[in-house]
Structures are given as C-alpha cells and as structure tokens.
Amino acid sequence: MASNYTFVILAIFAILLPAAAMAKEYIVGDDSGWTVNHDYQAWAKDKEFHVNDTLVFKYTPPNHNVFKVNGTEFNNCTVPSSNSALSSGNDVITLSTPGNKWYICGKGNGDKNHCQLGQKLSITVKEGAAPSAAFKIVSSASSLMVVAVMVLVTLI
Ligand SMILES: [Cu+2]
C-alpha cells in the first residue's frame, strides 16, 4: 500500500519535473498584486517572459479585473466593450504565443479609470526557452534516478 503510493508520487514527479523546470510563473506585482498606483513596467523590466510561462493576476474581486487588449487600447486605456474580462481575483494567463501582450484593469470611470491610475501591464514574450545542454543532462539524469528509485520501491 505504502509503496504503491510512493510509486504514484514518483511517477507524477517524473512527468511534471521537466515541464516545471522550464515554465515560470510570475505573480504580477509580486506581493502588491494587481492594483492601482503601481508601476508594472518597473516590475516587468528585469524579467524575461517566454512562451508557456504564466502570469497570475491577484486581487480582491470585484475591485479589479483583467482585460487583454491591443497596443492602442493599452495606450489610450480603452476598456473593450465585450464582456471578456477575467475576474476571479486569481487569474492565470498562459503566455501561449510570442510577441507583445497588453493587459489593463477595466474598473473605474472616465479619466480616473484604473488603467489611467497605472493598473496596466505591457510585456514582450519571447519564444520558448530552448533547454540548454546542461539542462538536458540534468533532466535525463534525474529521470534515470526516478526510474531507479521506482524499481527499488517496487522490489521492496
Ligand atoms: Cu482595477
């Protein structure tokens, strides 16, 4: 029973390990979360975003939301009329394609909307990070380890 359980855990790790090592998760604004009067360009400045990384927008609904917009809407803080906002307060966006991405909050009115108060994020997503030779060696070595441990656990 116990060894079966260990086997399952190890199998899950063997599957998830390579993906987890490659994709990064970014909490937008870190501890500040997604809010007004925050400099998200400063937050994004020293980060490299790649395809398959994820952005997590954290806030208390219904105070804020997240719209994916185009560059013009971003610059003008134009909230799209379509009701396509993310609004869970823990919105996870997978960066599935390379290029420029723009996100704004759609709350607030007129020239006091949250976007105009700084709740806007623009990033450039690069192609998926190619695994380095070192990474490949490490990941195949760790896969071998997992297989070896699985064999041992099954024998015990
Ligand atoms: Cu907002």
Image (cartoon, helix red, strand yellow):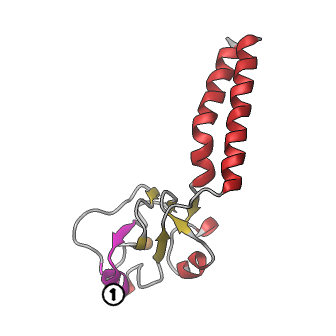
- Give residue 86's quadrant in the image: bottom left
Circle 1 Cα neighbour tier, 10 Å, few/some/many (<14 / 14–19 / ≥20): few
Q: Nearer the viewer, residue 12 or 92?
A: 12
- Give residue 9's quadrant in the image: top right
- Dot 1 falls on a residue whose secondary structure is helix
Examine the rendering and report whether any part of residue 28 can be seen: no
Read off the residue under disc 1: 76
Say if 38 sits above or below 60 in the image.
below
Q: In the image, which residues are magenta?
A: 66-78
Q: Nearer the viewer, residue 131 or 20?
A: 131
- Numbered circles on residues, count: 1
Q: Is residue 75 magenta?
A: yes
- Give the x, y percent position of residue 149: 74, 25
Could you tell me which residue is drawn at 65 percent across and 19 percent down? Answer: 5
Could you tell me which residue is drawn at 49 percent across and 57 percent down? Answer: 52
Q: In the image, is 91 to the left or to the right of 106?
A: right
Could you tell me which residue is drawn at 76 percent across and 18 percent down? Answer: 152
Examine the rendering and report whether any part of residue 27 can be seen: yes
- Give residue 12's quadrant in the image: top right
Could you tell me which residue is drawn at 57 percent across and 36 percent down? Answer: 15
Say if 120 sits above or below 83 in the image.
below
- Give the x, y percent position of residue 123: 48, 75
Q: In the image, is 67 to the left or to the right of 155?
A: left
Q: Residue furthest left?
A: 81
- Give the x, y percent position of residue 69: 33, 73
